[in-house]
Image (cartoon, rainbow, N blue to C red):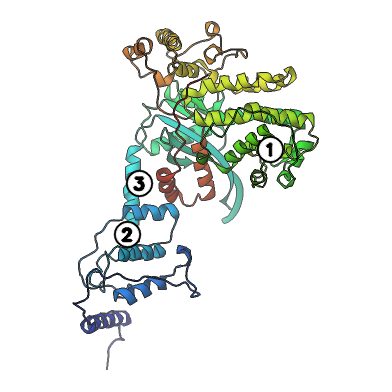
Amino acid sequence: MSIGGIDASVTKILKKRAERSRSRRTTPKTPDEPEDQQLDVSFSSRNGNGGNGYGDSTDSDFNGFAKKFLNFDPNKPGTSGGSSERNRMQLPNVIEAIARTGMPIRQAAVIVNATMADTNQITTHDRSKTVDRHYLKRQKKKILAQVKKKEEESMRSIEGLYFDGWKDETVNLKVQGGKSYQIKSLVEHLVLVEEPDSRYLGFVTPKSGTAISIKNAIMNFIALKKIDLPMLKIVGSDGTNVNAGPKGGIIRLLEKELNRPLQWAICQLHNNELPLRHLIEHLDGKTTSPYAFSGPIGTNLKECHKFEVIYFEPIETTLTHQTVDVKLFSTDQKYLLKMSIAVSEGFCSEDVAKKTLGKVCHARWLTAACRILRLYVATEYPSDELVQLVTFIQKVYAPMWFQIKVNHSVQDGAYNLWKTIHLSRYLSENLKAIVDPVIQHDGFYGHPENILITMVGDEREEIRQEAWVRIVEARAHKSEIPRSFHVSKFNFEANDYSSLINWNTTNVTEPPVLLSLTDAQLKKLKDDSCTFVIKNFPCHTQAVERYVTKSHLRPQRPKLMKIGTSRYLLKRFKAGRKCRS
């Protein structure tokens, strides 16, 4: 008579242990088989037709491969095969690839083992390097922790802070009367990126979309991550008033918080779109929604790619196929270049005409420009307004887009601004009255600090000497209170960027990125024949926008985004500084 019942779990463990022991004793050995025998590894999908990608693999594929070719069951511990040595192999590149691509652990184990078998690292007599999903999970946890620690250590000090934000619908819980309710509301998110390496720092959720709230969220994040700010020199964002307001904008509030000036790097690609936007609204009417126009030109943009290309009058542009390397740009940017050249040559090929265009959206004026060009080549009798818009795109918008993409450093900002003004002088007086105020209002690179950092890198010695004189004079009259960032009135007829403002009536302050230079280093700008090049801080925020897109698409996976994007993000286009003409 038994006092207690059978312990089922312990009995099951003992039974499996006995089975494994018996299996090892009865497994036939083949000592004459060559050690480097190749293993034929092939896996079938669930339907037996063969998988065409890692998404079709199953856990049974791996088990079948292990049982058939390696003579062990991966679901039973202690059956690793001929060698009892523990697998201590490290796979950091494999783990980072898994994190970057989002591949499931089970399928990754199948591929790793198949690769090991193909390279003779797993044979019928040595299966010590075989991995399973549990091994990869442990490796992933360990390596991700190491990467996170390394990134946090390298995050201690930054020189450039760029940010951009978005609003999305977020579900929040509201407790009322002892009950919880789900409430959807638009919540502000902000992505922070370190420059010049475009390294993802993180994202914050401020309490509201006001400048003071966003500034506090940024400072709280910096304190939480223990980031030192003594080396911070430059801050970048788009030119909205909440970011770049001269009195209460985020950048201005950061300057007050740190009690020192910062170099302003306002996105020049955004500023390049604003004159086109105002010109469209003036010639074709206001927008009616985030995705629609009210005028005859705008209403035809949605279906313009379906229209047949006909004969059209060419409108010249300075762009050529040799202007830039199209392989380095997005699909929309490639299309803009090809269509602009087609309009200039008076012939649009069928390949270009049948390209799929991006959707109409007022947040993407590049797409609007592409569609306007496409509409023009399909319009038999274009209106004067359509011709004026196409001419502006051909002469100003498209050339300046690629000018900024190629010369993308903040040290090129003042020249890019002057180039925009110079190219737009063909406009009639009534259209200049629309475009010029927009350029003036958003001409942040026309501030003396941004003009001076362009001048110190100029190839002309007299320009560098002039910059040295003005910087030394500004350093001698340095104020203890951080200056307020105001752009002086531009000379729209200037023949060079260095004469874009009236230096005699402008309060000139030293560029913050040059504050760390000694007087002796500054003097080299005058005496030496070499140019001075600062670090490659970008004059646009496209790298930040990529992170915004990734954060918006998968905010639930910030760890994967951090490793996958910051390490493997497409390399930013790096072109040499070209001679200015």
Q: Which residue is mark 3?
A: 148
Residue at 41% from the left image edge and 53% from the top image edge = 99
Q: Is residue 377 left or right of residue 40?
A: right
At mark 1, the secondary structure is: loop
Give 308 or 448, whichever is nearer the viewer.
308
Q: Is residue 430 left or right of residue 569?
A: right
- Callout 2, which amino acid? Arg
Direction bottom: furthest residue: 1
At mark 2, the secondary structure is: helix
Residue at 61% from the left image edge and 46% from the top image edge = 185
Neighbour tally class for label 1: few under 14, some 14-19, many 20 plus, Cα within 10 Å: some
Label 2 to label 1, Cα distance in Å? 60 Å
Q: Which residue is mark 2?
A: 138
Q: Which residue is mark 1?
A: 347
Say above or below: 578 vs 84: above
- Callout 3, which amino acid? Lys
Direction top: furthest residue: 504
Label 3 to label 1, Cα distance in Å? 53 Å
Q: Earlier in the sequence, mark 2 or mark 1?
A: 2
Neighbour tally class for label 2: few under 14, some 14-19, many 20 plus, Cα within 10 Å: few
Residue at 32% from the left image edge and 59% from the top image edge = 138
